[in-house]
């Protein structure tokens, strides 16, 4: 079987996601626990688990958590890390976000964090989440979000030049509309900004591509600068910011 672009990319970089600051220590990780208030008798599912950080965080609070991904290297790493942490109630399995291998009404909680912008179809993913959730089950999703219009297009282009598996981050309103269409009632939403260190963010590329990405920040229009806030564009400690949208919803 030929690997998809997403599998190829994340297979090569699996280990880095275990220690990636935005993934391992981002503000939204603890916010998910605080807002969902997981219970000891819950069955939870973390879709596109990546480095497994959401699954590790929720495992002590629930009866069982399944962590799914389409990258076997990620799943192998998560399984090993769960064993090291003594999380005996964490299970891993291969699953495409748009085709989850679980029965209807199986989970009390479904989570997905910083992944949907890689999915082939967010609409199909949401339909699957709705299907596997129990009635009144909780869905907690976090993903990069962008402003409407040309500024959002620029941010998406910037991200995709660095990572071709990045398809498209949505504006907040697009998430609201899609969740409603999929049969969810939104109970809470918020936006969280994260500062990105350019050096580590662009480390996978050679100097030419790093120079190109740096120029996209240096030559950005004022509207883009307002959103991304690039700092020290000519220095070694160049940084910028991205935004995450967080939604807590229930199956209607």
Image: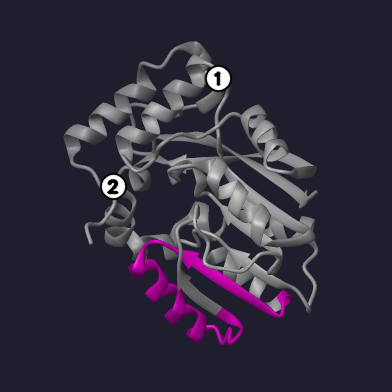
The reply to whether residue 71 is in sight is yes
Which comes sooner in the sequence, label 1 or label 2?
A: 2
Label 1, residues with CA under 10 Å away: few <14, some 14-19, many ≥20: few
Give the magenta-colored segment's residue range: 61-90
Label 2, residues with CA under 10 Å away: few <14, some 14-19, many ≥20: few
Q: x%, y% of residue 114?
A: 53, 49
Q: Out of 100 and 189, give the one closest to the viewer.
A: 100
The reply to whether residue 232 is in sight is no
Q: x%, y% of residue 92?
A: 49, 75
Image quarter (top left, top right, bottom left or bottom right) of the N terminus:
bottom left
Tell me if residue 247 is in the magenta stretch. no
Residue 218 falls left or right of residue 190:
left
Q: Out of 22 and 41, give the one closest to the viewer.
A: 41
Picture quarter containing residue 119? top left
Residue at 72%, 76% (x, y): give it. 62
- Is 226 placed above or below 115 here? above
Name, please, the residue furthest toward the top.
222
Tell me if residue 64 is in the magenta stretch. yes
Q: Mark 2 points at which residue?
A: 203
Q: Out of 109 and 153, give the one closest to the viewer.
A: 109
Residue at 38%, 40% (x, y): give it. 198
Residue 5 falls left or right of residue 239:
left
Q: x%, y% of residue 36?
A: 77, 59
Q: Mark 1 points at which residue?
A: 226
- Is 205 placed above or below 229 here? below
Q: Out of 178 and 194, give the one closest to the viewer.
A: 178
């Amino acid at each position: 079987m030929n690997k998809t672009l997403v599998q190829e990319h994340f297979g090569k970089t699996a280990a880095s996601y275990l220690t990636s600051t935005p993934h391992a220590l981002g503000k939204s990780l603890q916010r998910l626990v605080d807002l969902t208030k997981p219970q000891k008798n819950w069955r939870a599912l973390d879709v596109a688990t990546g480095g497994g950080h959401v699954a590790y965080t929720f495992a002590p609070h629930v009866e069982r958590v399944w962590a799914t991904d389409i990258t076997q290297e990620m799943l192998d790493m998560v399984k090993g890390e769960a064993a090291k942490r003594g999380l005996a109630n964490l299970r891993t399995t291969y699953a495409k976000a748009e085709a989850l291998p679980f029965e209807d009404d199986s989970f009390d909680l479904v989570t997905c964090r910083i992944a949907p912008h890689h999915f082939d179809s967010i609409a199909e993913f949401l339909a699957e989440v709705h299907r596997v959730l129990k009635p009144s089950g909780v869905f907690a999703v976090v993903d990069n979000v962008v402003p409407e219009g040309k500024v959002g297009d620029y941010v998406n282009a910037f991200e995709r030049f660095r990572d071709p598996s990045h398809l498209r981050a949505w504006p907040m309103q697009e998430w609201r509309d899609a969740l409603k269409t999929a049969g969810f009632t939104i109970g809470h939403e918020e936006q969280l900004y994260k500062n990105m260190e350019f050096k580590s963010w662009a480390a996978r590329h050679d100097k030419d591509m790093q120079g190109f990405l740096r120029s996209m920040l240096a030559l950005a229009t004022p509207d883009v600068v307002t959103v991304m806030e690039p700092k020290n564009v000519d220095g070694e400690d160049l940084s910028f910011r991205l935004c995450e949208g967080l939604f807590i919803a229930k199956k209607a």
